[in-house]
Every structure is written in structure tokens, then in C-alpha cells.
Image (tube, rainbow, N blue to C red):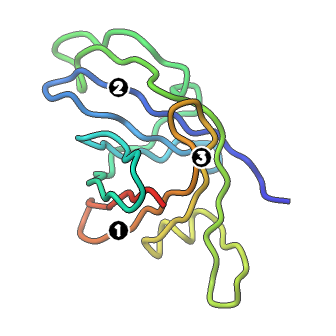
Amino acid sequence: MKEERIFVVQKHFATHLHYDFRLQVGKVLKSWAVPKGLPTVKNVKRLAIVTEDHPLAYADFEGEIPQGEYGAGKVVIWDKGTYQNVTVDEKGLIIPLNKGIHKGHLDIVLSGKRFRGSFTLIHFREKNWLIIKR
């Protein structure tokens, strides 16, 4: 049985509109800023830039971050649901999320209202990753 964890996509009207994609990994939300939003079409690649981890409680945050504070602007929950880690090693065994992040490759299945199905995250440079709809 695969363990399900939460994911959230927050539409963030900051200096530039972007979408914050967050995955529960342990007791935190690993986070990426996705300028054009998660892809909805198979094999489309989108840039995803690593941002700081957030506490799990942040998955429910909607509201206004005050001017003068980091990330100032309106935040709305665009989608929320669960996901499964389906990242496998050379032997076909599921590897832990932290190991996948460290190696720079995650395969996940999202179960939300807007985003459903398989996605791959691939690290390619510094804080830059690609998220691909499968």
C-alpha cells in the first residue's frame, strides 16, 4: 500500500503572479514556485523553483500577506488533495521522498480537483526543477 500525503497549490498574487506547489514531506511542506502554473497537458514541462519549506498548517492558508513582508500579496488555495510517491529505484522499489529530492527526481500521482494524475519533478540546476505532466 502506498502512503498518501497532502499537496496544495496556492495561487499567489505577489510581485508577479505565480503558483506555489507544496508537497508534504514528513512534517513540512516542500515548496516550489511555478511561474506559469502546473501543466495540465501531457508531457508539457514547466519551471519550478525551490522555495523555503513551510509548516504543514500553511496548506490551509488563504489571505493577504501584508505589504512590506516577504511574499506580500493575496494567496488563494487553487487546489488541494493527496498525492502518492511512486518514485522507484533501479530494482523497481519505491524510494523515500527525501531520497528522491536529494537525487533530483520525483514521480508522484496527484489526486486533487484541478490536478489529477502522474507528474514528474526533475532537478536540473541550482534551485531549478521541471515539473512535467505524464
The relative height of residue 25 versus residue 121 in the rendered view (above or below) is above
77 with respect to 34 (left or right)? right
Give the numbered dot on residue 11.
Answer: 2
Instruction: Look at mark 3 in the image and give the residue it sits on.
Output: 110
The front one of 8 and 134 is 134
Q: Does dot 3 land on a helix, a strand or a loop?
A: strand
Q: At which x and y percent is residue 127?
A: 27, 59
Give the numbered dot on residue 58.
Answer: none
Q: Quadrant of residue 56?
A: top right
Q: CA distance from mark 3 to mark 2?
A: 17 Å
Closer to the chain start, of discs 3 and 1, is 3
Closer to the chain start, of discs 3 and 2, is 2
Please tell me whether mark 3 or mark 2 is closer to you in this view: 3
Asked if the residue under mark 2 is in contact with the one under mark 3, i.e. CB atoms within 8 Å, the reply is: no
Q: Does dot 1 land on a helix, a strand or a loop?
A: strand
Instruction: Look at mark 1 in the image and give the residue it sits on.
Output: 123
Please tell me whether mark 3 or mark 1 is closer to you in this view: 3
The relative height of residue 29 versus residue 12 in the rendered view (above or below) is below
The front one of 62 and 98 is 62
Q: Amino acid at mark 1?
A: His
